[in-house]
Image: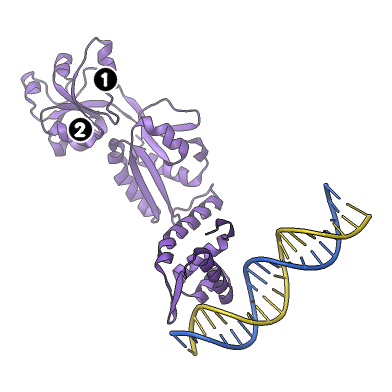
Chain colours: A purple, B blue, C yellow
DNA sequence: CGTCCTTCTTACTTATCTTC
DNA sequence: GAAGATAAGTAAGAAGGACG
């Protein structure tokens, strides 16, 4: 088909026909006479090379080609509506759009159940998507606009990115309840793991890209020490399950540990080094600073996560 | 180069025909 | 009889040529 001869008004007619399944009612819906809709349908038929709608009694039944086009045309019209609508205001009750967030499963666990409940209550036609990814992917996805918000610990950000602090977090060590080496050393839950023991016990770390050097390892290196990493996992949930298996211990953010420790039978301990508090926050592209929908989303995230 | 006029195209309307 | 298709007429805008 020749895209140059595609009039956007034809898509409005097509969309109305998909909804009404009637040329007359489609015309009433979009403010055209029945013959005008009929003529528009004819032009569409020539463009697409398909009947699109065939009459069956008093109904216009879409062909398979029309059904295949229907969703894509609706999405395209929604997108055009968004482009030309007033971006400074946002009405969640009628908004039809998708918000995409990116971060580790630690953030999705803490944020999304509550955020989803709040968003659904106010914006029934909004789709929330949380995608898995570490801070390293952040600049790229924000720059190209595929992600609305990323959640991460402090990272170096480009000048076009904005940051809002949400809460402080620190790492704690988790081990299976009654872990024999810790018990033998007389270390109780809540106490710090002695440096020598910490370095000698096998550990699992969370790493989305397989990297082995975390803030803890840098702190150990500064003291001329090294720990025994035997496993890396991209998700904290998997890390916690591995720790629950009993053969490794692992470090995880304190808030995440508080949520999972009880159900998985884990004890939590303080780190001997590298247990400083970090400023966790959200990042976005500054082009969305004044965008009503984006501001609404940020406010919702802030309400759920802010300390 | 800018303005005016004519012609052509397109999409609309009402009226009417055709189909179910 | 209801609803889609077609015919005829109309208005608006684009394109192109003539002219100062």
Q: What label does residue A273 carry, if any?
A: none
Instruction: Say which residue appears at 44% left-offset and 58% top-offset.
Output: A72
Residue at the spot 36% in from the left edge and 32% down from the top edge: A152
- Badge 1: few (under 14), some or many (20 or more) residues near its Cα, within 10 Å? some
Of residue A142 and residue A64, the one placed in the foreground of this image is A64
Q: Is the Cβ of the residue at disc 2 closer than 8 Å to that at disc 1?
A: no
Q: Is residue A254 left or right of residue A246?
A: right
User: Residue A216's mark?
Assistant: 1
In percent of width and height, residue A238 lies at 20, 36
Q: Which residue is mark 2?
A: A239
Q: Are marks 2 and 1 on the same chain?
A: yes
Measured along the vertical axis of the image, is residue A89 above or below residue C10? Answer: above
Identify the subunit bearing mark 2: A
Q: Position of residue A136 (x, y in %)?
A: 37, 29
The numbered mark, 2 or 1, whose residue comes first in the sequence reads 1
Q: Residue at x 7, y 28 (%)?
A: A178
Q: Is residue A222 visible?
A: yes
Residue at 48% from the left image edge and 70% from the top image edge: A17
């Amino acid at each position: 088909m020749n895209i140059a001869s595609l009039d956007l008004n034809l898509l409005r007619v097509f969309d109305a026909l998909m909804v009404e399944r009637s040329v007359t009612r489609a015309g009433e819906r979009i403010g055209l006479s029945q013959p005008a809709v009929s003529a528009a349908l004819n032009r569409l038929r020539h463009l697409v090379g398909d009947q699109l709608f065939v009459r069956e009694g008093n109904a216009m039944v879409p062909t398979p080609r029309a059904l295949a086009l229907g969703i894509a045309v609706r999405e395209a019209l929604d997108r055009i509506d968004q482009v030309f609508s007033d971006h400074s205001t946002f009405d969640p009750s009628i908004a039809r759009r998708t918000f995409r967030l990116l971060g580790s499963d630690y953030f999705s666990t803490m944020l999304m159940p509550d955020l989803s409940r709040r968003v659904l209550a106010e914006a029934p036609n909004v789709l929330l998507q949380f995608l898995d990814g570490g801070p390293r992917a952040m600049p790229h996805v924000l720059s190209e606009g595929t992600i609305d918000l990323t959640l991460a610990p402090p990272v170096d950000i480009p000048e076009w990115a904005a940051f809002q602090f949400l809460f402080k977090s620190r790492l704690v060590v988790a081990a299976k309840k009654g872990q024999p080496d810790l018990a033998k050393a007389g270390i109780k839950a809540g106490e710090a793991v002695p440096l020598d023991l910490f370095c000698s016990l096998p550990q699992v770390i969370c790493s989305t890209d397989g990297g082995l050097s975390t803030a803890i390892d840098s702190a150990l290196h500064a003291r001329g020490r090294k720990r025994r990493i035997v496993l890396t996992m991209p998700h904290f949930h998997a890390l916690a399950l591995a720790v629950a298996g009993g053969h490794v211990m692992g470090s995880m953010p304190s808030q995440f540990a508080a949520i999972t420790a009880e159900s998985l039978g884990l004890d939590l301990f303080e780190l001997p080094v590298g247990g400083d508090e970090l400023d966790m926050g959200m990042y976005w592209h500054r082009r969305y600073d004044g965008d009503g929908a984006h501001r609404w989303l940020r406010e919702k995230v802030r309400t759920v996560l802010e300390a």
